[in-house]
Image: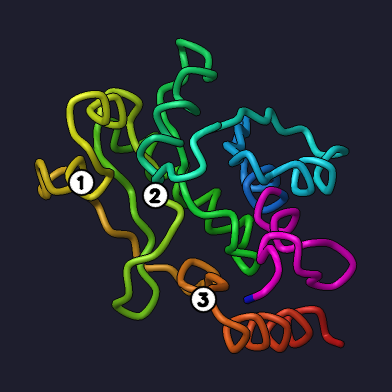
Amino acid sequence: MGRCKHLLPLGDRPVISRFLEALQKGGAEEIVLVLSPRGAEIREAIRDLPVTVVWNLDPEADMASSLRIGLKSLPADCEGILTGPGDLPLLTSGTVSLLIERFRGDLGRIIQPVFRGKKGHPLLFPRAVLEELHDLPTLREVIGRDPGRVVRIPVEDTGVVSDIDTPEDYERAKKMWRWRSGL
């Protein structure tokens, strides 16, 4: 994309801010953002948000290693962990609330949103399940270890599947943002 996708503007704030605000407004009690060594600009862009930033200093790190680092910074009494990429600026706080509500009613299960048959993010994991990353190399393997513990929740939120990986994705996100905002 030529630029850090998390810092692309969407309305008056960067993409990462939109994602973090949806988590906060949706009821996430503590937000931990794991950044790579190149994440100083992202940290600066979110400095006013109530977010704990931790660093994954391995520039070649994968999502699983970032999750392992993030887990270490969470309080011991944290039961559930929402995890997802920071480039989901259209995610709604209502979807986050729904995932949290469903998790509380079904402890021990992985909760995943699904939009029109397509699996999305963020996923909500019981802490004990996510701790399996200490024994398994990838999040995919944690999920696949026991597919019966995954509960897929249908949502009417395109934001769960609208990440920004290409310039075309970004243009679609801007159009959707303007439409939602009535602009």
- On screen, residue 106 above or below 175: above
What range is drawn magenta here?
A: 2-20
The residue indicated by pointer 2 is: 123
Instruction: Specify which label sits upstream in the sequence, 2 or 1.
Output: 2
Foreground of the two, 104 or 11: 11
User: Which of label 3 and label 1 is nearer to you?
Assistant: 1
Three-letter amino acid code at the position of disc 2: Leu
Residue drawn at x 38%, y 61% is 113
Q: Residue furthest top?
A: 76
Task: Estimate the x, y position of residue 35 in percent, counting from the top left.
Answer: 61, 40
The residue indicated by pointer 1 is: 143
Q: Are marks 3 and 1 in contact (CB under 8 Å)?
A: no
Q: Are marks 2 and 1 in contact (CB under 8 Å)?
A: yes
Secondary structure, mark 3, is helix
Task: Estimate the x, y position of residue 15 in percent, counting from the top left.
Answer: 71, 63
Alpha carbon distance from label 2 to label 1: 10 Å
Label 2 crowding class (10 Å Cα cut-off): few <14, some 14-19, many 20+?
A: many
Three-letter amino acid code at the position of disc 3: Thr
The residue indicated by pointer 3 is: 158
Task: Estimate the x, y position of residue 79 in percent, counting from the top left.
Answer: 41, 23
Q: Residue furthest front?
A: 59
Residue drawn at x 69%, y 44% is 39
Label 1 crowding class (10 Å Cα cut-off): few <14, some 14-19, many 20+?
A: some
- On screen, residue 20 above or below 47: below
- On screen, residue 162 above or below 56: below
Q: Are marks 2 and 3 in contact (CB under 8 Å)?
A: no
Image quadrant in which you'd find residue 103: top left
- On screen, residue 177 above or below 6: below
